[in-house]
Amino acid sequence: MPKKTLKRLFPNPKTIQQQPSLQFLGPLLHEPNLWHLNRRSVSRAFLVGVFFAFMPMPFQMVAAALIGVFAHSNLPISIGLVWISNPITIPPIFYFTYKVGTILLDTPTRAFEIELSLEWALTELGAIWQPLILGSLLCGAIFSLASYVGIRLFWRFHVISNWNKRKLKRHSNS
């Protein structure tokens, strides 16, 4: 997406900075890279957002926002990328990370039937938390680093491509 389109979709930084619920962050929200679309802030946003998308925890967006502020990443992108894990994608993502964790820990995969009750969830979570957390941390780290490097390379390719186009245009006009 072009920069102008993304800027229109993003919230106004002044509005966010004036939110009473965010005043505890003080001057941290006034960091320019939290709102600018540049190579560093966007690649850091992918690093933070994708990592927290793989974390099986409540309030992923809050964690991504807090780490994003301290990492000087683009805040809207950091928060938006957490939605990679949404109600539709959570089951396959966390099953995959659980399987990765069982392979790393060399434990058998548990077969279970899903019941929608708190008792079932707590019992199952108590039995699978170690491989789930380990797999989530590893997958989060790998996919976030891959997206960080991918964005940096894509951005570089895009800049070089634009330079070459301008260079050809200048030579054709002379």
Image (cartoon, rainbow, N blue to C red):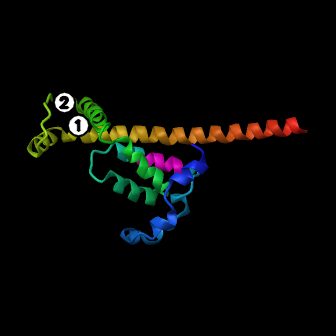
**Figure check: 133 above or below 16:** above
Q: In the rendered structure, which segment of residues is drawn in magenta?
A: 42-49
Residue 48 is covered by the magenta coloring: yes
Image quadrant where one finds the C terminus? top right
Classify residue 90 by image quadrant.
Answer: top left
Per the image, the residue denoted by label 1 is 131
**Left or right relative to 113: residue 90:** right
The foreground one among 131 and 73 is 73
Give coordinates of residue 76: x percent, y percent: 46, 54
Residue plotted at (13% across, 31% down): 113
Helix, strand or loop at disc 1?
Answer: helix
Residue 50: horizontal and vertical position, in percent? 41, 44
Residue found at x 15% / y 30%: 110
Q: Toward the viewer: 60 or 88?
A: 88
Identify the residue position indicated by label 2 in the image: 107
Relative to the observer, which residue lies in front, 58 or 101? 58
- Please tell me whether mark 2 sits on a helix, a strand or a loop: loop
Does residue 89 appear to the left or right of 165 in the view shown? left
Magenta stretch: dominant secondary structure: helix
Residue displayed at 41% across by 69% down: 19
Task: Determine the residue located farthest toward the right in the rendered image.
Answer: 174
Q: Residue 87 in magenta?
A: no
173 left or right, relative to 24: right
Point out the image quarter for the N terminus: top right
Q: Residue at x 42, y 49 (%)?
A: 80
Residue 61 position, x and y percent, is 36, 53
The picture quadrant where one finds residue 132 is top left
> What kind of residue is marked 2?
Thr
The answer, for residue 157, to whether it is visible in the render is yes
Please report contact status of discs 1 and 2: CB closer than 8 Å, yes or no: yes
> Is residue 39 something that shows in the picture?
no
Give the mark nearest the N terminus, 1 or 2: 2
